[in-house]
Image (cartoon, rainbow, N blue to C red):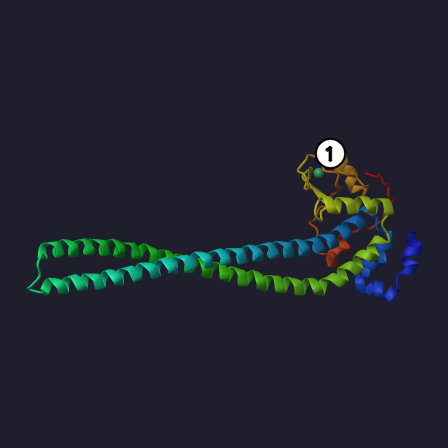
Amino acid sequence: MSRKKAIADLDDEYFKLLFPDSLSERLPQLSQMELLIHLQQIDRELYDFHRGLRILDQNILQAKNRLLKLRFKRARVLQIQRKLKKKLSSLQSRIREVKHLLEDPSQQDPALLVAKLNALKAYKLKFREALPPIEERRIRLRERFRKVKDLLRTWQEDRKKMRRMFKERQGGLEAQRAALQKFVDSSLMRSYEKLLQRYDGQAVVRVTEGVCQGCHTMIPSCVVSSLIGKRIVVCEVCQRFLYFIATPLEPIIDLNELAVEEPRRVRFHAP
Ligand SMILES: [Zn+2]
């Protein structure tokens, strides 16, 4: 689609709503590289939303699985605790019985009963000693359960907030994207989209101090200086589009200063 046609297709008022004044006027004059930089910012935001939601979903799922496992462990510890207590109380009543028999003066063999009593007491002591570590384990499990539950709640709230923000931004971002796309050469757009998928939302990367910020390869200085001329240049290693700007990228609304004052003729070299 030609630029003139693209501009004619856009409703003026709507177009101005999408972009800040100066940018909407300059958009038809921007170089292909500058258009890609603007597109990239929009896509970056969209990808960041998707990535953020995906990470939160994973975290939430993991936390839920963790809680299930902890619940299972806690149930087992409680079961052991109950068994131990039951055993202790039965030993206690047997000890009482033996003591009662010993009090009987007509008892035939008190020595045997005393031995039995001692054996029972030793047995009881063993069970009693087993109780505290199990109680400690139960408390530790309960604390871990609480911590994971708190984390789960935080992540669920974050996800809710993020979804709400995404809902608010999505429509505007997609409309901006569609408007910008009309000015980008179609074969360039195809390469851009491919890179976008391949590099998870990062098709256009900045060159800082002579280094591609995508793959950290040194870019020859003659290539860096050609970037100032807004040419389309790709990194030889990662194939991403390179750009060089003295100031860091700002959100789309503050992009005005990034556009060239005097638009230069685009020299498009397909990657
Ligand atoms: Zn690279």
Q: Is residue 238 visible?
A: yes
Q: Position of residue 96 (x, y in %)?
A: 18, 64
Secondary structure under tag 1 reads helix
Q: Position of residue 248 (x, y in %)?
A: 69, 49
Report the residue at 72% width, 62% height from top: 169
Q: Position of residue 120 (x, y in %)?
A: 20, 56
Residue that carries the numbered disc 1 in the rendered image: 221
Who is closer to the viewer here, 23 or 95? 95
- Residue 204 is left or right of residue 1, and the answer is left
Who is closer to the viewer here, 250 or 72? 72
- Residue 254 is left or right of residue 65, and the answer is right
- Residue 66 is left or right of residue 50, and the answer is left
Quadrant of the image occupied by residue 215: top right
Q: Is residue 222 above or below residue 174?
A: above
Report the residue at 21% width, 61% height from top: 94
Report the residue at 76% width, 33% height from top: 222
- Residue 138 is left or right of residue 54, and the answer is left
Which amino acid does the dot numbered 1 rest on?
Answer: Ser
